[in-house]
Image (cartoon, grey):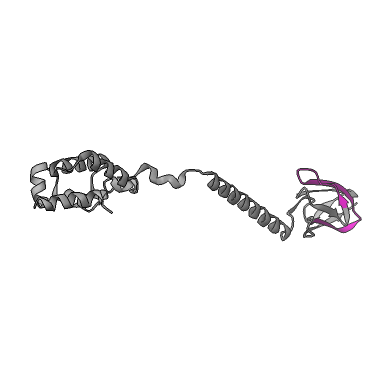
Amino acid sequence: MKTVGSMLQEARLQKGLTPQDVERVIKIREKYIVALEADNFAALPSPSYAKGFVRNYAEYLGLPTDAMMAFFRRQMTDVSKASLLPQGVPEPFQASWLHLTPGRFVALLISVLLVVFLFYLGNQYFRIGKAPPLTVVSPTNQEIVSSSRIAVEGQSDRDATVTINGISTIVRDDGKFYEQVAVEPGVNKITVTATSRFGKMTTVTKEVGYQP
């Protein structure tokens, strides 16, 4: 199959010319003459230069320029634009992988949903294996009181079940709880337990002395 380069080279050889001879007459550098004859359009400065070089070279060799330009345009449909740019100059459309096609959008959406799902599963697994937090702010350990009832106050998860000495108490939406507990003269143990919905427990025990 004849190409632009092969037809130019054949015409030059028939005239007994060298690339240096052509360079001296039409002022196209020898390396570009060689690139044109090899159909190596990537070695040319730009698409506009390539088109002009082909036209000038064809006219010099006496070839029909219209037919040569038609060959050139048809041949260029199989050559990427990037190959016609000088080295080091990026082709703006080379970043086409960033273009969001319907297929890529679906793949991206599935990836995002998968990540969210895996994060949810990991979070649930972490919560299953973790006991709920529990803080008892009142009473303090080894506190001495003079009343037969003391306030037991603290905070846990709002989903946790909190018991004080085995008796359930109400946990508010913010996780706080409050209860009045009766004590006997002497040393009393106040045991507060928070149980998650997965059965994990956290226990805090306070010793309170009651002196009537």
Q: Position of residue 188 (x, y in %)?
A: 86, 58
- Write the residue at 83% across / 46% down: 178
- Left or right position of 21 against 69: left
Query: Does 160 sit left or right of 54 as displayed?
Result: right
Closer to us: 125 or 199: 125
Residue 73 figure quarter: top left
Residue 168: x %, y % from top left: 87, 52
18 up-or-down from 66: above or below: below
Percent position of residue 164, x then y: 85, 54
Residue 35 visible in the current orientation: no
Indicate whether residue 192 is drawn in magenta. Answer: yes
**In the image: residue 28, left or right of residue 152:** left
Q: 62 or 119: which is nearer to us? A: 62
Q: Please give the name of the residue rendered at 24% of the width and 41% of the height, measured from the top-left corner.
A: 67
Coordinates of residue 34 in the picture (x, y in percent) = 18, 52
Residue 63 visible within the image: yes
Q: In front: 178, or 43? A: 43
- Is residue 204 on the magenta stretch? no
In the shown orientation, is residue 135 left or right of residue 63? right
Q: Main secondary structure of the magenta part?
A: strand
Question: On the rendered image, what quadrant is the N terminus found in?
Answer: bottom left
Give the magenta-colored segment's residue range. 168-194
Residue located 60% across and 50% down the image: 110
